[in-house]
Amino acid sequence: MAGCACGFVRAVLAFLLAPALVTLLVAPARGRGGRGHGDWDAAELLLPPLPPRENAALVARFVTNVCDWGALATISTQEGVRGRPFADVLSLSDGPPGKGSGVPYFYLSPLQQSVGNLQENPYATLTMSLAETNFCRKYGFDPQSSLCAHIILSGTVIKVSETEMDVAKNSLFIRHPEMKTWPSSHNWFFAKLNITNIWVLDYFGGPKIVTPAEYYNATSQ
């Protein structure tokens, strides 16, 4: 009899808790694509249309602004893979949605492997893709397809100057508010990619080369 009662109680609890568990599983995380993240989705904004593909510089600026993370490739200093390419995913921001500067800013710690690599060799290559957004899913483009626009930025990663500190901080914290709570013991600092080379892949036929001057002079979306 007691066994039946316990079974009945468990069944009732499962029935009552099931909706809450489903909600937790499907609710947006407080991160990319979640609520309160300062990005296009969280701000309840529709992703603007892709700029004309013939304007490669503007496409590059667009991709930089709508993406809030990228894969940064450095030259490894790690034992066993020294001198080989080493890629890591880093959060980034060039400013608020629709108001980007084009400068990819990072919030870095000496504890990160990529930072150790950069301390020995500051050269790096950053790639960002519209596969991060709903653009490619909406049109059914595979992430590797050139139609799923992505860009490759190469240059050096450097610490921002004191005069640029507030810009970098505001750019990152508006898109990544969680960063404000990261442990200070990790000695976080603001850095940026000093861009020297740009490739845009947004259509078939190979990459389009954009100069930094063309990139920064492009009228932002």
Image (cartoon, rainbow, N blue to C red):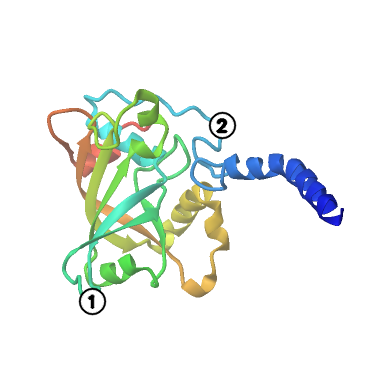
Q: Is residue 98 above or below residue 181?
A: above
Q: Is residue 130 above or below residue 204?
A: below
For marks 2 and 1, the one nearer the N-term is 2
Q: Is residue 124 above or below residue 203?
A: below
Give residue 28's position: percent from left, percent from top: 57, 41
Q: Which mark is residue 94?
A: none
Left or right of residue 92: residue 78: left
Quarter of image, res 25: top right
Name the residue furthest left.
205
Name the residue furthest right.
1
Give residue 72's position: percent from left, percent from top: 29, 55
Q: Residues under labels 2 and 1: Cα distance? A: 45 Å
Left or right of residue 145: residue 107: right
Residue in the image at 25% along x and 37% along y: 144
- Mark 1: amino acid: Glu
Q: Which mark is residue 44?
A: 2
- In the rendered view of the protein, which quadrant contains the C terminus? top left
Residue in the image at 38% along x and 72% along y: 110
Task: Count residues near mark 1 (Cα–Cα under 10 Å), then give few for <14, some for 14-19, many for 20+.
Answer: few
Q: Which mark is residue 79?
A: 1
Q: For mark 1, give the secondary structure.
A: loop
Q: Nearer the viewer, residue 1 or 117?
A: 1
Q: Nearer the viewer, residue 24 or 132?
A: 24
- Residue 16 seen in the figure: yes
- Mark 2: amino acid: Glu
Left or right of residue 68: residue 60: left
